[in-house]
Amino acid sequence: MNASKPQPAPHDRTATRRGKSHEAFARARRLIPGGVNSPARAFGGVGGEPIFFASAEGQHLTDIDGNTYLDYIGSWGPMILGHRHPRVVAAIERALSTGTSYGAPTEAESHLADLIIAAVPSIEKVRMVSSGTEAAMSAVRLARGFTGRDVIVKFAGNYHGHVDSLLVSAGSAAATLGVPDSPGVTAGTAKDTVVLEYNEPQQLEDLFRVRGDEIAAVLMEPVVGNMGLVVPSREFLAAIRDQTRRHGSLFVCDEVMTGFRLALGGAQQLLGIEPDLTTLGKIVGGGLPLGAYGGRADVMNHILPVGKVFQAGTLSGNPLAVAAGTATLEELRDHSPYERLDRLGARLEAGFRSAAERAGVTVWVARVGSMMTMFFQKGPKAVPVTGWQTASQSDTSRYAAFFWGMIDRGIYLPCSQYEALFFSAVHTDADIDRTVAAAAESLSA
């Protein structure tokens, strides 16, 4: 999702067994820019043409040509319970029977808010929006309004949606002001965003020492999924919390990916951290468009109509999305899958490592719970991936070949080296073993 990520050479992967997808993509390109409604779907990171899907059930996807795949995308994270989970489908059907949108308050919104607050201890009040991007945008505005400061700190390789002020990249120096990473983002919009390297606490401390009284917030992914999976060090997390408290800035955790994915209380529960604000998306909507941001009550009370920071949305708290999100969180609460997901993840991780070693392929495998990335590398020895500087050295062409090899074996992985894979509570040990066997074949081909 980062425009600066290196791209592999294109591949001609149009196969006769995916002929309908080829025709559908040709039509889509005549009607939709690039033929897709989100660029990650265009297969730019692996070459070839995207696959068009017709249906999903459990841990499987079926394309319009009738091919079925084991799904390791889960709609980029939301489908932790698998596709068409009975509890979620029933909740959507009940909501649909009474109306789709009212533009007015419902009791269901308060019930979902209660579930979120109960699950995430750092959240005392929460506001519903319609996407993770909207949650990040609103959290940044709130942080600036609350502190009366302008500067936002983010980290290279962290993605917080297509918000103008967050679509920035670093210059040659480690702590440069952000420069626009997309046409249409003005230099004026980007100038108040500072980009640092992830997992470099000294950079953060140096910046706060010089500009601490200008910084409204530090925004970060507590476990990164958007440059591939990268795990934060304890020292890095401690530095963020210490520096923001010391200088009166806000610590904002972007848990759009990790919220309810790594634990019911998200990555912050797993890592033992306490942010001031948290952004949520994906799982919180149970597969429908919903986001949320929440945190300390004194901060959240600066939002209209209690405070003066503006944020609104016609479809915020949409009844269908609220129903899907509520059913998902209740299922996660009532039948916790996290221990089993971690066990399956460990099995998949070990299998990938072993398959790569046997094939003589250099990889760095990073995993937390049911999120994982296998970084393909060019050297003889795997190098730990700790931030964008190391992630960006990945062998994207080798990953592209692996991706298509897995597609040919009925395994649907992320269509970019720089996206984490996800699996669901309905994946089985047999599914994991089949995936490892397919990986061994693909890597050795």
Image (cartoon, rainbow, N blue to C red):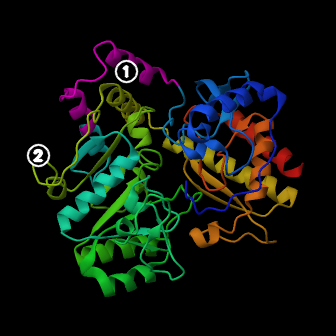
Q: Position of residue 432 (x, y in %)?
A: 70, 39
**Residue drawn at (30%, 59%) of the image:** 140
Residue 381 vs 19, above or below: the answer is below
> SS class of the residue under badge 2?
loop
Residue 422 in view in this figure: no
Q: Position of residue 176 (x, y in %)?
A: 45, 79
**Residue drawn at (48%, 57%) of the image:** 159
Is residue 352 located in the magenta-colored stretch of the structure? no
In front: mark 2 or mark 1?
A: 2
**Which residue ends up furthest to the top in the rendered image?**
97
**Residue drawn at (21%, 50%) of the image:** 124
Is residue 99 located in the magenta-colored stretch of the structure? yes
CA separation in Å, label 2 and label 1:
30 Å
> SS class of the residue under badge 1?
helix
What span is in magenta?
Answer: 84-113
Q: Read off the residue under disc 1.
A: 91
175 sits left or right of 290 in the view: right
Q: Position of residue 174 (x, y in %)?
A: 49, 81
* Helix, strand or loop for the magenta stretch, by majority: helix
**How packed is label 2: few (under 14 Cα within 10 Å), some, or many (20 or more)?**
few
